């Protein structure tokens, strides 16, 4: 009898210890998730965040004048000089030149007084112009170039009232099996503006949810990235979430990209693309294989303010 009581007590103690550990892990997971969500709102509404986007002006071959005056090819609706500069598009090259009266004193290029020269249009480190409350730079999408304009006093930023989220639910934090591609595939990712972007796809993640086994293929968003980028859609896009797509970023699989392994898909961290907040973004869309015929009621909901 004593042995029985001792064994029962030990099992009860072990169970309570495991339960306490699981509760602690769940509490930490939820705390980290809520902290991440708060940080996301701060990033979106930063002085140069997505909520400051006020324009996407496509460049035409030749000279493209820009400034506040109505006679510019690109008119900037802000308290800036009438004529800020000229962007000349020649093939795949963009050059900045001064307007007839010269660059205004408050026109900055990469933090220094403006001067004529070639413009870098790389996504990761473009040439950045500043004037007044505006920040703007040239982006390339396929064979097209556009001036992306941000305003730190944009109504979308000034009137921000928070994002909408599903309640945290550990059911949608799932371990997936990772199968690498050999060699890595190149995918042509469609965008909301009708162009395509070539991105490397290193493998596929397979997981089971609500009795269904599904697959998602991530891409590497930018060269040198140390995380996977999933562009996906599920059936909640018809009702409670943004219709075009949602994004999910994850760590690399436990054994690296080139070996079979596992990774965690925490759909509580599904987030809207910039296009959910502004008509001036150029978001990627999911491939057909990433359009899931199941509901994932987790992560970010539609933005409705």
Image (spheres, helix red, strand yellow):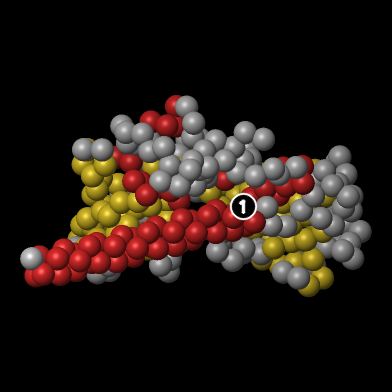
| Figure quadrant of residue 290 | top left
Does residue 2 appear in this view?
Answer: yes
Image quarter hosting the C terminus: top right
Asked where in the image residue 110 lies, by quadrant, the reply is bottom right
Residue ranking furthest to the top = 238
At 76% from the left edge and 70% from the top edge, which residue is drawn?
111
Residue drawn at x 50%, y 59% as measured from the top left: 31
Toward the viewer: 292 or 212? 212
Q: Residue at x 60, y 44 (%)?
A: 163
What secondary structure is marked by label 1?
Answer: helix
Camera-nearest residue between 74 and 80: 80
Q: Position of residue 131 (x, y in %)?
A: 82, 59
Q: Is 133 left or right of 285, judged from the image as shown? A: right
Left or right of 42? Residue 300 is: left
Circle 1 residues within 10 Å: few <14, some 14–19, many ≥20: some
120 or 110, nearer to the observer:
110
Quadrant in the rendering for residue 21? bottom left
Per the image, the residue denoted by label 1 is 41
Whether residue 220 is visible: no
Which residue corresponds to the image point at 57% horizontal and 45% vertical from the top-left?
Answer: 274
């Amino acid at each position: 009898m004593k042995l029985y009581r001792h064994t029962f007590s030990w099992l009860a103690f072990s169970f309570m210890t495991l339960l306490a550990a699981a509760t602690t892990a769940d509490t930490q997971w939820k705390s980290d998730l809520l902290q991440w969500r708060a940080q996301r709102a701060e990033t979106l509404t930063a002085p140069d965040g997505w909520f400051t986007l006020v324009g996407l002006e496509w460049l035409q071959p030749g000279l493209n004048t820009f400034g506040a005056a109505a006679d510019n090819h690109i008119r900037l609706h802000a308290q800036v000089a009438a004529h800020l500069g000229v962007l000349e598009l020649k093939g795949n090259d963009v050059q900045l030149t001064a307007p007839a009266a010269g660059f205004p004193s408050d026109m900055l290029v990469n933090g220094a007084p403006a001067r004529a020269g070639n413009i870098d249009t790389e996504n990761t480190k473009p040439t950045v112009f500043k004037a007044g409350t505006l920040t703007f730079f040239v982006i390339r999408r396929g064979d097209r170039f556009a001036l992306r304009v941000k305003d730190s006093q944009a109504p979308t930023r000034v009137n921000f009232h928070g994002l909408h989220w599903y309640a945290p639910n550990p059911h949608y934090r799932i371990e997936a099996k990772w199968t690498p591609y050999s060699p890595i595939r190149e995918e042509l990712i469609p965008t909301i503006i009708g162009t395509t972007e070539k991105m490397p796809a290193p493998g596929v993640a397979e997981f089971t949810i609500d009795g269904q086994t599904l697959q998602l293929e991530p891409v590497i968003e930018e060269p040198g990235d140390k995380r996977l980028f999933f562009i996906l859609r599920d059936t909640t896009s018809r009702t409670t979430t943004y219709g075009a797509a949602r994004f999910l970023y994850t760590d690399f699989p436990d054994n690296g990209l080139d070996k079979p392994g596992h990774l965690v898909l925490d759909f509580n961290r599904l987030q809207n693309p910039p296009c959910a907040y502004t008509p001036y973004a150029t978001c990627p869309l999911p491939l057909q294989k990433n359009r899931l015929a199941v509901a994932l009621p987790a992560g970010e909901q539609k933005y409705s303010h």
